[in-house]
Structure formats: C-alpha cells, structure tokens
Image (tube, helix red, strand yellow):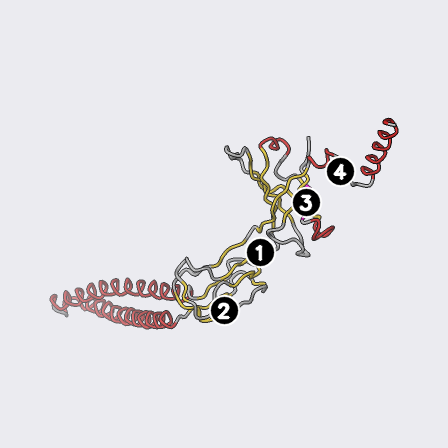
C-alpha cells in the first residue's frame, strides 16, 4: 500500500512539474526583484520667490526641454530691465559723443603741429592737455558702458528666472501648486517632471552576486507579470554597478537600463530580473 502511495505521489509531482505548477529550484534562484525608476525625474521648484501668475501645462502633458512650465509675476523685473536698457543707451551715447570730441581735438592738435611756430607753445600745450583729458574721459565712459551692459544682462536674467522652464524632455506627472500661490526660492514644490523614455531597474543584490554581474551584460526583465503579462517582458542592460558594498547589509546597488517605447512600463513598478549564472 505504501509503495502504491509513493508511486502516486511521484506521478503527481511529475505532472505538476511538467505543467509548470511546481517551479524548479534552479530557475527561482536566478531571479532578483527590483524597482523601475526614471533616469530623469525631478520636483520642479523656482529659483526665486514670487507669485504664480500662470501655469502653462497640465498633468500628463509631454513637454520639451526649455518649454515654459510656469510664469511668475514679473512686473518689477520688467521695469528693472527697462531702466537698465535706458542706462545702457545713455552710456552708449556718451561714449559716441566723447569719441567724436576726442577725434576733433586730435585733428586740431595735428594742425597745430603742422603750423609749428605760428601757434604759441602755450596754446599747443593746452590742446595737447585737452586730448589727454578726453582720452581719460573716454576710458572712464567705456568702463561705465561695460558696467551698464552687465547690469542689463543681470536684470534680464532676473526677468528670465520668473519663467520656470522644463530642464529636460519629459511628462508632467503631478501639479503641486495653483495660480496665485506664493513660492519661496528653491523650496516650494511646483510640479513633478519625469522622463518616461529613459528607465532603469534598481536592484540591491547580496555581495555573493558580484562575480555574476558585469556592466554591459544583457539580462531578461519581467515587469509586473500579473499586470502587464508579455508586454512587461523586455531586455535590459547592466548600466551601472556600485563599486562599493553596504557594510551593514552586505549588499551592492545595480542599475539595469531598459527601454519600453509602448510606455506600458512605469516608474515605481516591480521588476524581476534574471541574473546570469556562472
């Protein structure tokens, strides 16, 4: 009776194994679980304090690098630019006028030199001194002109910072602020921007796996099997291996670069990576 029961048990195990109900231990040992993360993802904040005048994007919208995301109130900065431009125009005009005056004085001095003894020496000396004075004035005015140009650029930069631009191509995933909100410089979260085209799987592996992982090697990745099924199966490339080991957990970090043009795979999903064995 016991022999018959044992035969039945073996037969059941064989059937379970053949139908994939009972996974082989060797297959389970070669997998590691990680999390999908974006290569580029940021919570956008403002460089300067201000009040949100307009929000130019919506949640889920794709944007390009340099595109305007949010406009802060900028009336004061616009006035600053206008004043800087007026000062720059005044400085440019002063330099032009001084150059003309100095050029005329030089011509006069040249005519005096030709006349030689026909002009009293004191008059010639006075004209020469006037040329030197005009040269010194022109140097000072050119310095003021350079300063006015820098001031104009500074005021324009302040105005530009009132427009918050996309730092990279991506998708707006969350809007965290509204029109009329006051934002503090580099503190208030405004929106989340994520590049959904550049993803990787982050793995934390035991130190024993170091000999089995090489940068550039290709691995099979299955993301959220129950949710995505075959659509979650992609090829990954080991893009980074942390050269240090966490001494407390005896683990090291690995990044697996993946690509999913269909965008079925999303940051935050769980992924199973089949590790190479040696």
Label 1 or label 3, whichever lies nearer to me, is: 3
Label 4 or label 2, whichever lies nearer to me, is: 4
Residue drawn at the location 28% of the way across and 62% of the way down:
143
Q: Is residue 110 above or below residue 196?
A: below
Residue drawn at the location 34% of the way across and 65% of the way down:
149
Magenta span: chief secondary structure: strand
| Labels 2 and 3: the sequence-earlier one | 2
Label 1 or label 4, whichever lies nearer to me, is: 4
Range covered by the magenta-colored residues: 219-223
Q: Quadrant of the C terminus?
A: top right
> Mark 1 and 3 residues: CB-CB less than 8 Å, in contact?
no
Q: Marks 1/3: CA distance? A: 20 Å
Seen in the image, is 2 located left or right of residue 119? right
Q: Secondary structure at mark 4?
A: loop
Q: Does 221 lie within the magenta span?
A: yes
Which of 9 and 22 lies nearest the eye of the viewer? 9
Q: Marks 4/2: CA distance? A: 53 Å
Residue 207: x, y in percent? Answer: 58, 32
Q: Marks 1/4: CA distance? A: 37 Å
Task: Report which residue position mark 2 lands on.
Answer: 55
- For residue 125, the mark is none
Residue 150: x, y in percent? Answer: 34, 62
Residue 86: x, y in percent? Answer: 32, 73
- For residue 23, the mark is 4
Residue drawn at the location 84% of the way across and 37% of the way down:
15
Seen in the image, is 200 located left or right of residue 113? right
Residue 161 sits in quarter: bottom left
- For residue 195, the mark is 1
């Amino acid at each position: 009776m016991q022999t018959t029961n044992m035969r039945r048990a073996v037969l059941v195990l064989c059937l379970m194994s053949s139908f994939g109900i009972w996974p082989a231990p060797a297959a389970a040992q070669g997998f590691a679980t990680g999390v999908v993360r974006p290569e580029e993802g940021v919570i956008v904040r403002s460089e300067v304090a201000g009040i949100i005048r307009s929000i130019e994007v919506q949640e889920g919208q794709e944007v390009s690098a340099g595109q305007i995301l949010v406009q802060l109130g900028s009336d004061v900065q616009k006035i600053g630019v206008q004043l800087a431009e007026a000062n720059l125009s005044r400085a440019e005009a002063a330099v032009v006028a001084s150059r003309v005056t100095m050029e005329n004085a030089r011509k006069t001095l040249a005519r005096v030199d030709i006349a030689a003894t026909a002009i009293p020496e004191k008059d010639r000396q006075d004209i020469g001194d006037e040329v030197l004075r005009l040269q010194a004035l022109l140097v000072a005015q050119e310095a003021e002109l350079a300063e006015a140009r820098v001031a104009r650029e500074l005021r324009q930069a302040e105005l530009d910072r009132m427009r918050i631009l996309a730092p990279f191509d991506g998708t707006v995933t969350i809007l965290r602020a509204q029109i009329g909100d006051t934002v503090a410089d580099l503190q208030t979260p405004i929106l989340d921007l994520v590049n959904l085209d550049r993803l990787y799987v982050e793995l934390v592996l035991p130190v024993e796996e170091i000999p089995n992982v090489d940068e550039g090697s290709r691995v099979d990745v299955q993301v959220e099997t129950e949710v995505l099924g075959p659509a979650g199966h992609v090829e990954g490339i080991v893009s980074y291996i942390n050269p240090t080991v966490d001494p407390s957990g005896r683990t090291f970090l690995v990044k697996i670069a993946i690509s999913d043009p269909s965008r079925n795979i999303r940051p935050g999903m769980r992924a199973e990576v089949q590790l190479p064995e040696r």
